[in-house]
Image (cartoon, rainbow, N blue to C red):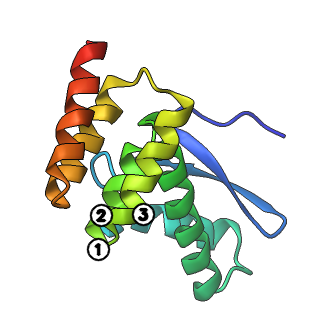
Amino acid sequence: MSEIPAGHFSVIHGNLVVNVPRNIFKGNGAAIDEEKAAPFRDMLKHRYPWLTENSLNILMENARAAMIRILDEETNGRSLSEELESRGRPDEAIRHLKKHLEKNPQDADTWYALGELLCRSGRTEEGYKAFARGRELF
């Protein structure tokens, strides 16, 4: 397997391995910037002419899902937790952060993110405890 260029990650689509540039995503998130993604999609169409429009859409959705996993790993659960909360699933977001804190209980930033999420969910007492735990770690 060839080396992945800097600023890229690999996505597997059938037997095809595609190096996806991280700069096709908006900001620090996993939303695809269609304007930035258009040249990448065009390159894929020309390089792999057998890919249908539907296949390209699936490949891009797989890239977005991979980016969510990468960001989540890089942020110790905070990225996916934000995504879950934005989709109206705060309980899942809270469980996700707690799962990451089981693996890395010394992560002050994740304790703070958990505190914010708990407070926004109306669980202020738990939220304040999470904030306090995060402050202890600084």
- Asked if disc 2 and disc 1 are in contact, CB closer than 8 Å, the reply is yes
For this rendering, which residue is in front, 135 or 34? Answer: 135
Residue at 73% x, 33% y is 3
Camera-side residue of 43 and 132? 132
Task: In this rendered view, identify the residue nearer to me: 111 or 65.
Answer: 111
55 lies above or below 120 = below
Identify the residue at the far front of this view. Answer: 125
Give the residue at mark 3. Answer: 92
- Name the residue beneath numbered marker 2: 85
Determine whether 45 is above or below 79 in the image.
Answer: below
Q: Is residue 92 visible?
A: yes
The quadrant holding residue 48 is bottom right
Residue 32 visible here: no
- Relative depth, front residue between 90 and 30: 90
Name the image quarter holding residue 103.
top right
As shown in the figure, which amino acid type bears the numbered disc 2? Glu
Read off the residue under disc 1: 88
Q: Position of residue 34 (x, y in %)?
A: 34, 69
Mark sitting on residue 34: none
Position of the N terminus by quadrant: top right
Q: Identify the secondary structure beneath mark 3.
A: helix
Residue 120 image point, x, y percent: 15, 57
> Quick check: marks 3 and 1 in contact, CB under 8 Å?
no
Element at badge 2?
helix
Q: Residue at x 38, y 58 (%)?
A: 93
